[in-house]
Amino acid sequence: MQRIIRWVIAVGLVALPLAAQQNIAIISQAQQALTLADAAGAQIYAKSLYDDAAYRIRFAQDNINSTRASMQAQAEMRAREAIFAAEAARAKARWLATNATISNLQSDIQRFGGSSNLNLATEDPNIDYRRGATTNERIAAAQAAIDQARSAGAERLVADNDLKTAESYVASARRASSNSDVADYQAYIAEMIARRAYYMARFNEASRSLPDIQLQRTRLAQTYSDQQANLERAQREEVERRTADLQRQLAAEQANRQAQAEELERLRSQLDENRRAMQLRIENDRAARIDAETRLDEAMRQYEAAAVSGNSADLDRLRRNVEDQQIALRTVQERERLDSQALSAEIDAARNDANQQADLTQRQSQLDQYQRELQSDITARAEIERRHDAAIAAAQQQRQQLEAQAQTLREQIQQAQSQAQQQAQAAQAAQQQAAQAQQALQTAQQQAVQQQQQLTQQAQASAFDAEKARQTAQSAQAELARTREELARRSAETEQLRLQQQLAAIAATKTESRGIVVTLPSVSFDPGKTTLKPSAKKTLQKIANQLKANENIRMSVEGHTDNVGKAEKNMTISEKRAQAVRDYLVSLGISPNHITAAGKGESDPVASNKTASGRSANRRVELVISM
């Protein structure tokens, strides 16, 4: 972090503006920081910061190639501000996601009869950071953020808090002239550094409480399971006691058959009823065990699949789900063990009763078969859980390795960019090193996809073994169908993620429920015109090269305008611009059957039309890509 800050200071205040290649690298770095924030859940837990960073990136992309030097400088400052805003959003998302995990664990503790008095500090994900309208007010807001971080113990809890650097930014902003862009820029970066330190301090503070809460939840869950097993055991012992009493009464009555014939018949009917109830209970417990095993295997598959690429909140939720299903299965297994004991005790009692010798052999055979089934199931479950534990351990190790590789590659990219900054004469060589590092990162990502497929195959093997252990519940054909559906879903998700990463390197990209949305900036057309500019055609050529390889791609081209002028004219311009983009993509090889065009006019703004930057953001063409 310190290295990035120094790099930004040196470049932002001494060497504005940079060459076009360096500007693109800064925007790329901001997009990477925003992607990391998104992966940490910033769109949910730190939406206002995330949206602020995304807006500054869009402004930078729209104006970095402006013919006006002042606009280029503004675009570069917004890109650098976006880096720090994304870092703060990522830190806040990690803090609030940890809070959510702790809250879920506390709910479980209360459900199991325990209590947790841990009170967590929190903050609204959509909080409006009020910075004021003047430079002095923004400097005061930055200083307040620094004071807040120090009050939360950031200097003690966060090793790379960088609060001294933030103080130096504030001091520099105070020395600048009033209401200047540079002073505003310095105040904003100081505020984002301080907010990141504050959120990291809160995250570290919450993380220290997480292991104890998890341990308390696990212990209470086990205690609850034991209580349920004891209750079941007491109920069964009561039934067995009553059955033994009936058997003793029957033996006593048999000594005086002639006098007690009717009573003897009644006792026999009761004993038969108890046997039928026992058999029904055995069948119900067997069905419950099969259902519990099915749920546990599904929970294991989800946990194994998420172990490589899922976030910490999802992993914790899936782990708790596996624990709950294991507790439910152990409860059913305990009932079956008690069933076996009760049946064995009944057969032992029948050996001493001459009137029950006729079906004793058959009942003993049923008992032996039942006990073998239980033992076989226990053995199979032990092997499945062993494989599950091995798969999880391997996935976690792989995830750690991939994260370490990704961190190493990011450091290599930053080092290459720093060398390019310091050695202007060797800029071309540094860019080649950065490209090589980027290629290595893509190779590592491809290896991650391959290893994830291997883990998926291991999960399928575990699922196959589970199906083999409970042959009475499901058929192998049904399992194969589910496995194919899961593979198809994972393949589609992987392909969509790959496509999104490739498109993000070309233009502003986001993911919505309707698909991947690629935004072409307003500079793609001259004002009031519907003819594509050469720069826009180059961007569309790169996008088409990524899309032509996939025959399953479907694309909708949507044109948008600001609210300047008449709505009818804006609708006509948006339709013609969307059609122009569609025609050009078709000319590049995209199937005309896979692409449509529509004009939205001024009906769907993404920013306020009251400002020039907002109107510029609203004048756009969006490619909505689905698979």
Image (tube, helix red, strand yellow):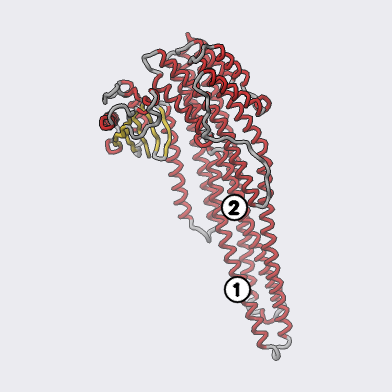
Please state the total of marks drawn on the protein image.
2
In the displayed structure image, the side of residue 116 where residue 415 appears, left or right: left
Q: Nearer the viewer, residue 143 or 444?
A: 143
What's under tag 2, amino acid-wise? Gln
Mark 2 or 1: in front is: 2
Sequence-first tag of 2 and 1:
1
Q: Quadrant of the C terminus?
A: top left
For image coordinates 62% across by 65% down, the residue present is: 370
Q: Is 530 drawn above or below residue 109 in the view shown?
A: above
For image coordinates 46% across by 46% down, the residue present is: 486
What's under tag 1, amino acid-wise? Arg
Coordinates of residue 19 in the picture (x, y in percent)? 43, 13
Q: Nearer the viewer, residue 557 or 385?
A: 557
For image coordinates 43% across by 33% down, the residue present is: 510
Q: Quadrant of residue 269?
A: bottom right
Q: Nearer the viewer, residue 138 or 547?
A: 138
Residue 340 shows up from this direction: yes
Write down the residue under mark 1: 276
Label 1 crowd bin: few (<14), some (14–19), many (20+), radius 10 Å: few
Write down the residue under mark 2: 325
Q: Residue furthest top?
A: 425
Residue 145's disc number? none
Coordinates of residue 322 in the picture (x, y in percent)? 59, 49
